[in-house]
């Protein structure tokens, strides 16, 4: 028990800026100056049709899973007096709410991961339009609302995201910019030095 604590204290007490030499006679070499200047890299944009298909599959599967879980908890929250049935309205409300929140998060995340540059608010606006259309078509029937609003919300979110591509101006990269890479042999092996702005 004491040995791991002493080891941790020893490791934490060593200054990260201090050079480490394996042998006292080994020369301590500093890495050379910057060797390469590379631009920040953004994922290569995927073809739009492929990106839409992936967004549809990923967001749809995730939304259905989370929506089913939300519907289950909606059922648990509203049992009938005999304990045998659940309120269909509560299942629909909880299921559509959890489904909608999942779609609102997953569609922009999947699109951005595939190199798309649509706007999040446009995706949310399209999803809201799909929800409104689905609820209007259902005319107050909770089961119809589930089967009509859910696919329209997904299609609306993807449509809003894809139609707003390019509206945000130039895309800034969030990835790191590598500024220097150096490999230098020493007597004990080699030293790899990496410097950059992260």
Image (spheres, rainbow, N blue to C red):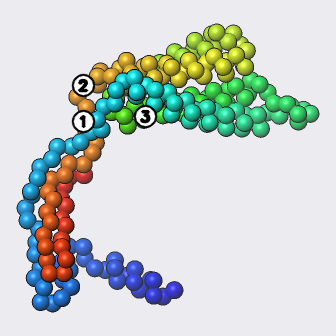
Q: Is residue 75 above or below residue 145?
A: below
Q: Mark 3 packing: few (<14 Cα in 10 Å), some, or many (20+)? A: some
Q: Secondary structure at mark 1?
A: loop
Residue 121 appears in view: no
Marks 3/2: CA–CA distance: 20 Å
Give the x, y percent position of residue 33.
7, 61
Q: Mark 1 packing: few (<14 Cα in 10 Å), some, or many (20+)? A: few
**Residue at 18% across, 88% down:** 23
Q: Secondary structure at mark 2?
A: loop
Q: Are marks 1 and 3 in contact (CB under 8 Å)?
A: no
> Dividing the picture into quarters, in which one does residue 95 lie?
top right
Which residue position holds label 3?
A: 110
Which residue position holds label 1?
A: 172
Give the x, y percent position of residue 46.
34, 30
Q: Mark 2 packing: few (<14 Cα in 10 Å), some, or many (20+)? A: few
Marks 1/3: CA–CA distance: 18 Å
Which residue position holds label 2?
A: 169
Most distant residue in the right direction: 82
Residue 119 versus residue 45: which sits nearer the camera?
45
Q: Secondary structure at mark 3?
A: helix
């Amino acid at each position: 028990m004491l040995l791991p604590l002493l080891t941790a204290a020893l490791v934490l007490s060593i200054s990260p800026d201090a050079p480490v030499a394996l042998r006292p006679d080994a020369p301590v070499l500093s890495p050379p100056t910057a060797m390469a200047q590379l631009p920040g890299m953004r994922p290569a944009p995927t073809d739009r049709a492929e990106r839409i298909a992936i967004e549809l599959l990923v967001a749809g599967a995730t939304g259905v899973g989370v929506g089913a879980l939300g519907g289950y908890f909606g059922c648990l929250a509203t049992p009938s007096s005999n304990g045998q049935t659940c309120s269909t309205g509560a299942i629909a409300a909880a299921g559509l709410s959890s489904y909608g929140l999942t779609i609102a998060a997953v569609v922009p995340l999947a699109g951005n991961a595939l190199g798309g540059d649509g706007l999040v608010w446009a995706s949310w606006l399209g999803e809201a339009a799909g929800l409104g259309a689905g609820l209007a078509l259902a005319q107050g029937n909770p089961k119809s609302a589930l089967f009509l609003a859910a696919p329209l919300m997904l299609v609306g979110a993807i449509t809003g995201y894809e139609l707003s591509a390019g509206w945000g101006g130039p895309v800034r990269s969030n990835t790191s910019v590598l500024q220097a890479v150096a490999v230098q042999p020493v007597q004990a092996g080699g030293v790899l030095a990496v410097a950059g702005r992260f």
